[in-house]
Image (cartoon, grey):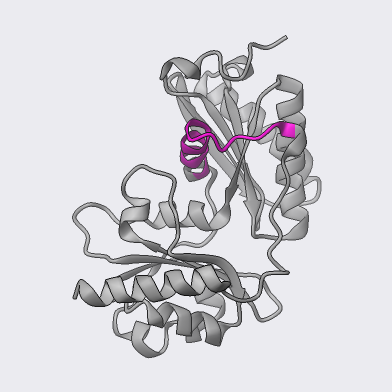
Amino acid sequence: MLPAPDSRAADGARPTVLAIDTTAGACSVAVSGPGGSASLSRPMTQGHSRHVLELVDAVLRESGIDAHAVDAIGFGSGPGSFTGLRIACGIAQGLGLGWNRPLVPVDAMRTLAVQAAPGPDESADWVLVALDLRMGEVCMAAFPLAAVSDGQWPEPAFGPVLAGPAAAREAFEALGATAPVLAGDGFDAYPMLLEGRLAKAPRPVRARQPDAAYLARLTELGYRGGRAVDAADAAPTYLRDKVALDVGEQAALRAARAAAGGSR
C-alpha cells in the first residue's frame, strides 16, 4: 500500500503533484515537485483516454518522479466540453483511488488567469477570462491583478458565470479596466467582447486553453490550502444552469468597479 496522502507534505515540504487537463481540444499532463517537473500535451483524438494515461507515464519518466512520490492529483474541473471534463475527472479518480491519493479540482478560469498573469514589470490592472462554450455563450470571470500575482489561490472579483457576448462585454466594461490582460478563446470567438471601452486598450490574448503546467501550480496551492477531496467524491463542474450574476456577484462587480474608479 502507498503511504498516506499527507505523510510527506505535512511537515511543510513542497508536495509533488500530478495535473491532468482535457477540458478543451488537447490532452495536457504535468508533474511537479522537489524531484523534478515535466509537462506534455497532444491534440485530442480517438482513444484520448488511453493517450492521457500514456502522457502520465511519459511525464513521470521524463521528470524522474515515481508514482509513489505523488501527493495529490489535480484535474481540470471545467468549464469545458462534457466529454473532456468526464475524461479528466475519471482518469484522475482512477489514479487517485489506485494510488490512495486525494484530488484537487481546478477550474479552467483560474488556470487561464494564472497562465496569462503579467510579469512584475508590466502595466496591467485586470485579468479578464472568457471561454467559448458554443451555443452563443461564454464563461467569463475577472481577476484583479493581485489575485493572480501573490502566490495564493486566485479569487475572481466575479465569475465564473455564463453570459452572452453582449452581457459579458457589459460586465467587463463595468470594471473600468484600463490595461486588461486577456485569456481564453472566447475573445477570438466573439470579437465584440473587445468593442466599446475595452477597444481603447486591447491586449493580445495570452492563453487560450488551459495548460497542465499551470494547473499543477494551482494543484499545489489547493492541496496546501485544504481544497483536496477524496477521489471518490470528485466531480466536474457544469455551469449550464448558471446564466447570470447572482446577488453576491453583482455586489462584487459594483465593488470592483468602485475600487477601479478610485484607483485612477
> Compared to 195, does 145 lie above or below?
above
Residue beneath the point at 59% across and 28% down: 72
State the image coordinates of residue 167 (x, y, percent, origin top left). 54, 84
Q: Residue reaching furthest right?
A: 47
- Quarter that holds the N terminus: top right
Q: Quarter-wise, where is residue 228 in the image? A: top right
- Does residue 26 show up? no
> Compared to 42, does 1 lie above or below?
above
Q: Quarter-wise, where is residue 4 in the image? A: top right
State the image coordinates of residue 104 (x, y, percent, origin top left). 60, 38
Is residue 195 on the magenta stretch? no
State the image coordinates of residue 49 (x, y, percent, origin top left). 77, 42
Residue beneath the point at 59% across and 69% down: 161
Q: Quarter-wise, where is residue 12 in the image? A: top left
Residue beneath the point at 56% across and 19% down: 6
State the image coordinates of residue 59 (x, y, percent, origin top left). 57, 29
Q: Is residue 221 left or right of residue 242?
A: left
- Quarter that holds the C terminus: bottom left
- Does residue 180 show up? yes
Q: Residue reaching furthest bottom?
A: 196
